[in-house]
Structures are given as C-alpha cells and as structure tokens.
Image (cartoon, grey):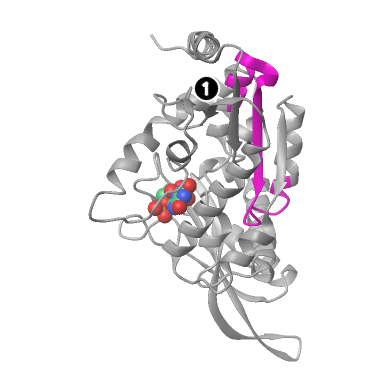
Amino acid sequence: DWTPAAFVHETIEKIKAQVGDKRVVMALSGGVDSTVAAELIHKAIGKNLFCIFVDNGLLRKNEYETVLESYKHMGLNVKGVNAKDMFYGQLDGVTDPEKKRKIIGRLFIEVFQHESAQLTDISFLGQGTIYPDVIESVSVNGPSVTIKSHHNVGGLPEKMNMQLVEPLRFLFKDEVRRVGREIGISEVFLGRHPFPGPGLAIRILGAISPDKVAMLQEADAIYVEGLREAGLYDKVWQAGAILLPVQSVGVMGDERTYEFTVALRAVTSTDGMTADWAHLPYEFLAKMSNDIINRVKGINRVVYDISSKPPATIEWE
Ligand code: XMP
C-alpha cells in the first residue's frame, strides 16, 4: 500500500543515492509541485540544492515577495531574480497567445541558464514534474496539433545537458499534496489553486503592459481574497480574473466613464482536463463586482464566465 510516509523515506534515500555529494539546481514556481519536490531534495541533500525563483512580472499581486519569503523560511537555499523588465520588454506589442507563451518560455530558460551558469559544479537539474505533466505533454502537443503549448515541462534538460532529479514523476496531484503535508509544508502552499506558467500574460487578452498587469493584479487580489473570506476558495479548482480588451461606457457620479471590463472565472474540476463553471452565490458575485469597480481604477464593468470545458478552456488564451 502506498503511504506518504513510506514514499518520503524511500524517495529521500533514492535522491541521496543518485546525487551523492554533488550539487542540484532547480527552478521554483511558487506552485505545489516544485515546492514539494524542492523540499524533498532539500531533505536529502541540504545546502547542495540551489534554487532559483524568477519574477517574470506576471505573477499575482505581492506573490513574488511573499513566496520568496516562505522559501527562505523553509530553509531553502534560494535566489530571487527580478527579470520583470526583460519580460515586459520582449512581450511589448505581442497579441498572439502562443507567441506570448513561446517568448515567456524562452526568456525563462535564458534567465535560468544565466543564473545556473553563475553556480559552480552543478551536476543535476531538479524538477517538480508530476505524472499528469508527463501524460499531458504527450497528448496535448501532438505531432500535428498544438492546442496550447504548456511550457512548464521539458525545454530545460535537453539544452542544459544535466541529469534529472524528479522525485514526483509518478505521483498524481493529490498524492503530491499528501507528501507535502507529511514533510510539513504549510497548507497555504498545498491548497493553492493551479496557476499557469505564463501567468497573467494569458489573462490579459491581447497586448500586455505593466499598467494592465497592475490593474489585473488589483482586481484578481480582491477576487481571490474575497473567495477566501467567503470560504469558497477551497471549493473551487481554480479561479482568477481576466482583463478583457474591451472598453465600455459607464457612469461614476456625474461623469461618463469609458473603461475596461474584467471577467471573473471560477471552475470546479478534478484534473483540469474538463471543468464546470462554479455556481458561486449571486451575493458573493455582487460584492466582488462592487469591490472591484469601486477600488480598481480603470475598470467599470465586471462579468462572470459561465462557460464549461469543453468547449471553452479554463484560461481565455
Ligand atoms: P486550459 O486553459 O487549457 O487550462 O483549460 C488547463 C489547466 O492548465 C493551465 N494552463 C497552463 N499551465 N502553462 C502552464 O503551466 C500554460 O501555458 C498553461 N495554459 C493553461 C490552466 O491554468 C489550467 O489549470
């Protein structure tokens, strides 16, 4: 029978045997998988694990600072890299979703390689790959059709010529959470919704700009905080706000406004492959709409996405 305790014990022994006294470098994303994988490797080899956490300027509000602090608190040897301007610069004027993904994926690899090259004697690359990533990267990116190029798997190893350490490769998400709990990772990390690698870039339809990122971060933070306060966060698989490239007329006091629209998305799902829109209470949606319109400058309209997957996808790009 599979138990988290036995898995942790065996995995730490395996990592020790594989890595010995060599060094491992690993990118952290703030998500459950990379965090649990890093902590397992850390338990096996301690300070010989070197972690890199990149701020691509596309994370949620305050996410970079908060998550970096938590990593340090966990005792991980982590370097935060602020690469925002590079990402904003290269994404300037880019509207095609797949182009955005490719640019973000490529820049991420560049930044990671550059940072790894500053470290000496690195022999291994740690990754938080889980079993569905292995499957999905095969089925989604078939030879003739790419629905969406998920960039969080692959890419790194071939170019970096390093052996992989992937402690979660045969686990499903719920098993990863149980392992995380077993090794004392906080519930805040373990209960987090999935968040796409390209981040808010694919939740701002069309061209992105630092101003639009800031606007969306505010709206998204109000929404996510609202879900937590209402006890709804753990009831949905994933939720977030999307900034539409649509301006519409509104009225504020005696003034006519002409501002942007935010769409709120929340879905229930078990694996992200299919999903239903979450039937959030009207009162909650009403509060979110008021709070966002009153507090976020530049937004005068909020809509709720009532599309399920398929035929819609969870993300809008
Ligand atoms: P879709 O929009 O395809 O999303 O229904 C399914 C799940 O995948 C996430 N997603 C991504 N994750 N890179 C990622 O790392 C991506 O390019 C990407 N696109 C979608 C999405 O957030 C959802 O959890």
Q: Amino acid at mark 1?
A: Arg
Residue 146: name its quadrant: bottom left
Would you identify the image quadrant in which residue 129 lies? top left
Range covered by the magenta-colored residues: 38-64
Q: Nearer the viewer, residue 65 or 266?
A: 65
Q: Position of residue 224 (x, y in %)?
A: 63, 52
User: Quick check: is 292 in the magenta stretch?
Assistant: no
Would you place residue 219 above or below residue 194 in this image?
below
Please state, as top left, top right, bottom left or bottom right, where the N terminus lies in the image: top left
Name the foreground residue: 54 vs 68. 54
Q: Is residue 184 visible?
A: yes
Residue 231 makes an appearance in the image: no
Question: Residue 134: which quarter of the image?
Answer: top left
In this picture, residue 253 sits left or right of residue 182:
right
Q: Residue 36: percent from the left, percent from the top?
A: 57, 27
Identify the residue at the far left of this view. Answer: 144
Per the image, label 1 sits on a secondary structure element best described as helix
Give the class, few, some or many, for how many residues have Cα within 10 Å of label 1's Cα (few <14, many ≥20). some
Q: Is residue 222 above or below residue 115?
A: below
Where in the figure is residue 25, as x and y percent of width and height? 60, 30
**Residue in view at x 58 percent, y 39 percent:** 192
Question: Which part of the image, by quadrant, shows the C terminus?
Answer: bottom left
* Residue in front for this viewpoint, 275 or 252: 275
Q: Position of residue 267 (x, y in %)?
A: 45, 51
Q: Residue at the location (69% across, 61% down)? A: 85
Residue at the spot 30% in from the left edge and 41% down from the top edge = 138
**Assess mark 1: CB under 8 A from ligand 1?**
no
Q: Kindly identify which residue carries mark 1.
A: 178
Taking 117 as reference, is 103 above or below it?
A: below
Up-down relation of residue 302 to residue 227 (above or below): below
The reply, left or right, for residue 14 in relation to residue 218 is left
